Amino acid sequence: MDKVFVKLYVPALEEIYDVWIPSHKRIGNIIVLLIKAINELNDGCYMPTKMPSLYDKLTAEEYDIELSVKESTIRSGTELILI
């Protein structure tokens, strides 16, 4: 399974995470996995009331949740923001 290494900024927690994400999964599924992982790492402190969006930090482009990571511009080294 191919994975991509990204830097994830979570402004709600003022935290930065280095994360490996699977490139074959859809971005919507990746967001759900990221929420679960961040919640576990922060003792249940990250519970967004609605589905957050994933953005490219440099371009401010919002990623389409229907695309797979492979189909998007996300590559190893990409900096993302989860808002």
Image (cartoon, grey):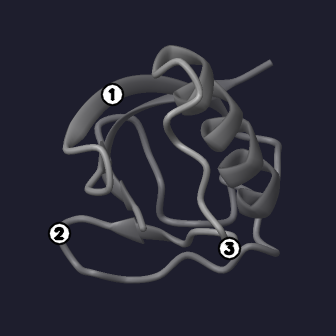
Whether residue 3 is situated above or below residue 71 in the rendered picture: above
Of residues 61 and 42, the one drawn nearer to the viewer in this rendering: 42
Q: Which quadrant of the structure image shows residue 56?
A: bottom left
Residue positioned 23% across, 79% down in the render: 59
Whether residue 47 is situated above or below residue 67 in the rendered picture: above
Tell me the residue that label 1 is attached to.
17
Q: What is the spatial separation of the Cα atoms under label 2 and label 3, in whole angstroms? A: 24 Å
Determine whether label 1 and label 2 are within 8 Å by CB.
Answer: no
Residue type at mark 3? Lys
Mark found first going from the N terminus, 2 or 3: 3
Left or right of residue 5, residue 38 in this image: right
**Residue 45 horizontal/vertical position (percent):** 49, 35
> Helix, strand or loop at disc 1?
strand
Residue type at mark 2? Leu
**Residue 51 horizontal/vertical position (percent):** 69, 70
Left or right of residue 61, residue 38 in this image: right
Neighbourhood count class around disc 1 (C-alpha, 10 Å): few under 14, some 14–19, many 20 upward: few
Neighbourhood count class around disc 2 (C-alpha, 10 Å): few under 14, some 14–19, many 20 upward: few
Neighbourhood count class around disc 3 (C-alpha, 10 Å): few under 14, some 14–19, many 20 upward: few
> Helix, strand or loop at disc 3?
loop
Of residues 26 and 81, the one drawn nearer to the viewer in this rendering: 81
Tell me the residue that label 2 is attached to.
58
**Residue 14 horizontal/vertical position (percent):** 19, 44
**In this rendering, the label closer to the viewer, 3 or 1:** 3
Residue positioned 17% across, 69% down in the render: 58
Tell me the residue that label 3 is attached to.
50
